[in-house]
Image (cartoon, rainbow, N blue to C red):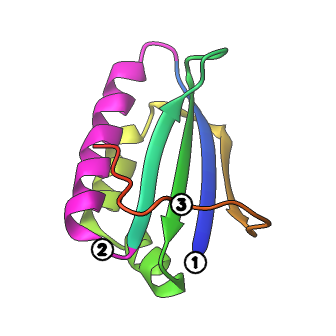
Amino acid sequence: MITVLARFEMLEGKEIEVVEAVRKMAAAVKANEPGCLVYTASRGKVNGRELYFFEIYEDEKAFQDHARTDHMRAMQVAMNGCIDNSSFNVESLDEVGGFVRDKMDLG
């Protein structure tokens, strides 16, 4: 499995645009990417302009396929000028423990 954690900060006044783009993206990932096992986006409680993505992919191919989708390109276009590019960080993670419950579906 491939686990990814991404973080960036939305520009002030652009939060609604970004959240709408993220919701569209999440729906497209769920509908079109069976190799994506978990895809969640959450907003920071301390800094509401921070957005965090937690993603788990079945394998490297599923992760690479995700990066090449039309909906990924559409989200990138929608977010152009809406995020602080200097805050953008993507990290691949090595699992050291934990679990994912079977039949977990957040929406």
Q: Quadrant of residue 65?
A: bottom left
Secondary structure of residue under mark 3: loop
**Tag 3: amino acid:** Val
The residue that label 3 is drawn on is: 100
- Give the Cα separation between the discs numbered 2 and 1: 13 Å
User: Which of the two discs, 3 and 2, labels the residue nearer the N terminus?
Assistant: 2
Secondary structure of residue under mark 2: loop
Name the residue: 75% across, 69% down.
94
- Direction front: furthest residue: 102
Q: Quadrant of residue 17?
A: top left
State the extent of the magenta-drawn residues as a range.
12-35
- Give the Cα separation between the discs numbered 1 and 3: 12 Å
The residue that label 1 is drawn on is: 1
Judge left or right: residue 107 versus residue 64.
left
**Tag 1: amino acid:** Met
User: Which of the two discs, 1 and 3, labels the residue nearer the N terminus?
Assistant: 1
Q: Please name which of the two marks, 3 or 2, marks the residue nearer to the observer.
A: 3
**Tag 2: amino acid:** Pro
Name the residue: 29% across, 71% down.
33
User: Which of the two discs, 2 and 1, labels the residue nearer the N terminus?
Assistant: 1
